[in-house]
Amino acid sequence: MKKDSRHPEHQYLDLMQDILDSGEEQVDAGTGVKTYSVFGRQIRFDLSKGFPLLTTKKVYWNGVLQELYWFLSGQTNIKYLVDHNVHIWDDYPFRYYNEKVKAGKMPELTKEQFVEKIAKDAKFAKTHGELPHIYGEMWRKWPASDGRKVDQLGWIVDELRKDKDAHNTVLSAWNPEFLYAMAAPGKAAKYPICHNMFQVNIKHGKVCLQLYQRSCDVFLGVPFNIASYALLAVVLAKILGREPGEFIHTYGDIHIYENHFDQVKEQLKRKPKPFPTIEFNKSFKSLEAFRPEFVELKNYEPHPPIKAELSVVGGYNEKLHGKKKKLVKKA
């Protein structure tokens, strides 16, 4: 197979063009929002040749960095993100809060008022800022059937320290016990798990990571996901005392929202610039020792941002998933 000699960001741009050219129309069952989608794609980045923070539009680096730490540290409450001026998760607990408003259980608030209360009122944040069964919990505190909390990511680090040739270092955030109609009544997570599984592998002495993402918003979400999991690979390499290798991003349903077409076409006109690099200003040898302030992004000079509206779709849908069928049979 002939190797592509172009800038590696062209893989992403080609993917957007592919969806424009051949994407199939589909409609979100909960909101009626339309997307145009293809299924089953893959791109890959050699992390020794630059950090894949896309350059054809500015990617929100502080959001990437703080969100990854939020996951790595096992947190599930948005207060940490709000306190660090990251608001990419605000819409999900606010949507849940509004369900309580409609039921007459809580007073009506604007989104701005809701976020302000999360920031200033610790009791309110504890009650209304929590996102149970989200990535941080699944990564570091997976609820086992015997009551234990399984630290999947910590196990991966330990396993690769003991066995550099391990093939089993897989982490799943996809827990059927809390998803859709598979969950017990009242136990379904209302928040979509999109980047649901990754595997870490050491090849040629370098730490490689492959992500499988089941649902992918190519314009808003995917650039963020690329940077987040590439950074995870770099952090794991540092902890393991190795160099980072490849980040491979495998997509399930990858799509463009109907209100993002103009933005996609604008981005496709832009020429990629050199990728930045990542440096650490302090050494660390464990997940617990890592802090966001240890990371320095160097030489990131992207094109200007392109703004687009986030569509809060997916996840538990009462119309689809509320009427439960008996999915598990007793022996």
Image (cartoon, grey):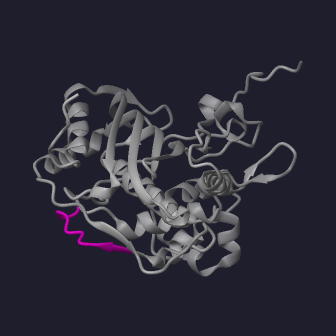
- Picture quarter with the N terminus: top left
- Residue 270 drawn at (x, y percent): 11, 53
Give the residue drawn at x 17%, y 63%: 303
Would you identify the image quadrant in which residue 273 lies? bottom left
- Residue 32 drawn at (x, y percent): 42, 34
Question: On the picture, is 18 further left or further right than 230?
Answer: left
Would you identify the image quadrant in which residue 297 lies? bottom left
- Residue 292 drawn at (x, y percent): 49, 74
Give the residue drawn at x 83%, y 42%: 145
Magenta stretch: dominant secondary structure: loop
Identify whether 180 is placed above or below 83.
Answer: above
Identify whether 262 is placed above or below 93.
Answer: above
Q: Which residues are magenta?
A: 296-305
- Picture quarter with the C terminus: top right
Q: Nearer the viewer, residue 315 or 133?
A: 133
Question: On the picture, is 173 further left or further right than 262?
Answer: right
Figure label count: 0
Identify whether 214 is placed above or below 45.
Answer: above
- Residue 283 drawn at (x, y percent): 51, 77
Question: On the picture, is 253 further left or further right than 192?
Answer: left
Q: Nearer the viewer, residue 211 or 125?
A: 211
* In magenta segment, residue 197: no
Question: On the picture, is 154 further left or further right than 215?
Answer: right
Give the residue drawn at x 22%, y 31%: 18
Identify whether 296 is placed above or below 313.
Answer: below
Would you identify the image quadrant in which residue 193 lies? top right
Q: Nearer the viewer, residue 164 or 236?
A: 164
Tell me, yes or no, if residue 310 can be seen here: no
Tell me, yes or no, if residue 300 can be seen here: yes
Give the residue drawn at x 70%, y 66%: 127
